[in-house]
Amino acid sequence: MAPMEEEPVSATPPPPSPPHFVIVPLPAQGHTIPMVDLAFLLAERGARATLVVTPANASRLRAAAGLAARANLPLEIVELPFPPPAETGLPAGVENVDQVTDYAHFLPFFTALRSLASPLESYLRSLPSPPSCLISDWCQSWTSDVATRGGIPRLFFHGPSCFYSLCDLNAAAHGLQPQHGERFIVPGMPVRVEVTKETRPGFFKEPGWEAIHEASMEAMRTADGAVVNTFVGLESQFVSCYETALGKPVWALGPFSLYNRDADMMASRGNDNTSDVDAQTWLDEIDEDDSVIYVNFGSLARKPPKYLFEVGHGLEDSGKPFLWVVKESEVISPEVEQWMSAFVLRTATRGLVVRGWAPQLAILSHRAVGGFVTHCGWNSMLEAIAHGVPVVTWPHFADQFLNERLAVDVLGVGVPIGVTMPVMLFGDEAVPVTRGDVARAVSALMDGGEEGEERRRKAKEYGEKARRAMEKGGSSYESLTQLIDSFTLQAMETTEQASQPPPHFVLVPLAAHGHLLPMVDLARLLASRGVRVSLATTPLNVARLRGVADQAAREKLPLELVELPFSPSAETGLPPECQNADKIADDAQLVPLLNAMRDALAAPFDAYVRALRPKPTCVVSDFCNPWTAAVSRRLGIPRLFFQGPSCFYSLCDLKSAVHGLQDRIVADEHGTAFVVPGMPVHVTVTRGTAPGFYNAPDFDALRHEAMEAMRTADGAVVNTFADLEAQFVECYEATLGKPVWALGPFCLGNRDDTLMASCGSTVLSVDQRALAAWLDEQATGSVVYVNFGSLVRKAPAQLFEIGHGLEDSGKPFLWVVKESEATAATAEARDWLDAFVARTATRGVVVRGWAPQVAILSHRAVGGFVTHCGWNSLLEAVAHGVPVVTWPHFADQFLNEKLVVDVLGVGVPIGVTAPVQIMDDVSLPVSRRDVARAVLELMGDGEVANERRRKAKEYGEKARRAMEKGGSSYECMTQLIQSFMPSGVTE
């Protein structure tokens, strides 16, 4: 053969810069944590991730940022100033949903989030080159305009399960509006899903929230796709259907929580530890695996004293070792303090009560934890699933009821505690959950005979699937690869030079824990993949996220926090420090808060993005932040909306809206059950449980804005994974007509306790080592974890019921009681809680305040989770293979319950059928018997319980695989990033 002539040597173009994802989580624990996880996942994969949060939230992420820095991950936290109280009417310092103590501050809080648009826009414009993509929480619809104006592709992160998100989307698409008490089938669902008005999917459903809901829906419609914290092995049919219904790519990248693979990262998710209880040490001392019941109701659900008592007594009666996380706000009265002290002493030999924040991921991953009493928030549910822990489902509101349905009915990993009605965020006195319910559910979960063994088997199987999903070659891993690659390719296609900086995603989360945390997770996931990520939020939330920023810096992750100035004005009626939904004092403050954020944050966000050079690649804003749509549109920046709930819920919500069902549901006064049209499974909802955020009268304007922002978004980001909600993701994408990026579970992107704990309040309420030690002492899968999220605040009576129910269940428990619940409690309630803690100290832990949920759910001792069915909590439970007790309260929680209970089969419903106000759940009829029943059913050893547990473990494994390279969520993220930049993704 003749020698070939040498070709002229040409200069090899430099490799392209990695894509830059700017993540804008909702400033709420349940939303921020998975987005922080996602940010880490992205950064670990070579993408630059920037978490855009307010200062207070940035401070919570300081530990996470430090971890990222130490790991040389390209993750940064950008602080956006939160408007001052004078502008928002919020209390001073309120920058996160978990800081909202008055429901009246919620709307002003969400409104105030809109003022982050200007500083976010300024930040985006200040960048040398536009970010590749902006990923914002579904509730941060205001990022849509920012992305549009900056010409940045935008994905929305949908925090709940795809099951819930699909229910929500289908319910909205079909106009599903069940009447009070009426059961309706959610149309278009791949499985039969029935909802009532109280448990129907849909965020921002309350009066006055219409504008925010509409803006969020519009931002979802105009987004370029969605990122979900789930995995194909858990919700495959729902992810697929959600994507189809949405008409956009849905990147199932979870469970994000499985990214947290060591103690420091697990602890850095959420608030800082303020408790002197070492759950890890306690768990280490538990000889029997799967013997501890972990009890945690998330960052929002706040149990009143009577329900703390019921939970405590239920745990005590169950006879099971327990790790019970009790929020500090739940034990502020002398009565509760006294009761709790007595309870702790009385149960010291088999229980640990963590007051405040507990490292949920570390707890759920502990071999001793065998159950989780959860509020059914998706983060908690997915964390449980990811660690193979079956759950007692105690949904409270939002997506939690549908999360419960997913866990209990679909996945078969949950034991419902029996809640059928949602509660207000700050109370649930009318929910009839008694110690008997708690004991029953815990016993059912931890014992359960063949049914319990099957439930546990399923949970462990899902846990294994979650693990594999996050590994290289797994569905979530490969989905993340595809997501990153998609933005890499997109960025390359829009420039003449091959060497482009990475895509830059600006994330604008809703200032509420349940929305903020998943978007922080998402920011880290993007940054770990080499994407530059900016997370824009209010000062309070930036402060809370400072640990995440520090960790990102140490890991050299391209993730930054952008502070959007915000302080509620006096006209809003909100305290000046109200910069997060967790700062509102009652339900009436929610609409003013949302309006204040909308009015105050848009301008600084606009200014921030406008100042970026080049402009960001994409804005990803929470669905509840619809004001970002105008900013993105003005600047010509692609915008994705982050839909915090599950795809199941989101699809129900969208189908209901599309088919005009929402109007019929809202008008119903007879409890009619409406079938959500167009769902791949049968879903019925009532007025109280129907999908649709901002559906209440006060939310009309906000809902309109949110829906419009969804319509104009370029896609959506959801915190789920294909194996969990494939059909719902597919249907959601088809219905939305935009890409839906299922990138979760985001929580699997956090690898240690420190990172897990850093996303909540500035200080953890529990000693990580002590909590882990307590969990280590518990038998594997034996602990039921009880946490009702960052917003739900239980009234004393409900705290009593929870406590007694946990006590009655006889299961080991870890019960998280919010500080606000304790503060609002009577002296009698505080005394009761002290007595309860003393009484159950041998088998339970009550955490007063903030607990590291992902760390708890990831502990092998946690075998069940009593949850409010917030999607973050549910997905965290799912991601860790933990079955749940679903106790939905409001918003998407009822449909999350349906997803978890009816579709996934990993949840046990506690029996709530009607929603409650965020700050008050006095009308929620959950008794101690309901709590005990659900816990016992979840933690039992029967065939059904074992199957539920098996499913949870299976989904947990699927979640893990989804987040690993080759997994659906990993590859979905790869595609997302590629859509903004052609190459350069680190695998």
Image (cartoon, rainbow, N blue to C red):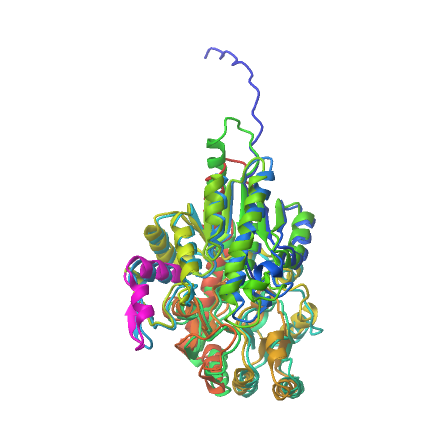
Give the side of residue 653 with respect to residue 462, left or right.
left
Q: Residue furthest right?
A: 276
Residue 838: x %, y % from top left? 66, 86
At x 60%, y 35%, the residue is 128
Left or right placement of residue 835 versus residue 315 in this view: right
Is 649 one of the magenta-colored residues? yes
Q: Nearer the viewer, residue 227 or 87?
A: 87
Give the side of residue 440 with respect to residue 580, left or right. Answer: left
Q: Is residue 237 visible?
A: no
| Spot occupied by residue 440 in the image (x, y as percentages of width and height) | 47, 84
From which residue to which does the magenta span run? 648-677
| Viewer-side residue, 664 vs 183 | 664
Q: How many marks?
A: 0
Question: From this viewpoint, which residue is outermost toward the front?
Answer: 571
Position of 224 with respect to 602 (left or right) is left
Residue drawn at (32%, 69%) of the image? 665
| Main secondary structure type of the part rendered in magenta | helix
**Quarter of the N terminus within the rendering:** top left
Q: Is residue 792 magenta?
A: no
Residue 329 visible in this rendered orientation of the protein: yes
Identify which residue is drawn at 50% across, 80% down.
Answer: 442
Position of the C terminus, as image quadrant, is top right
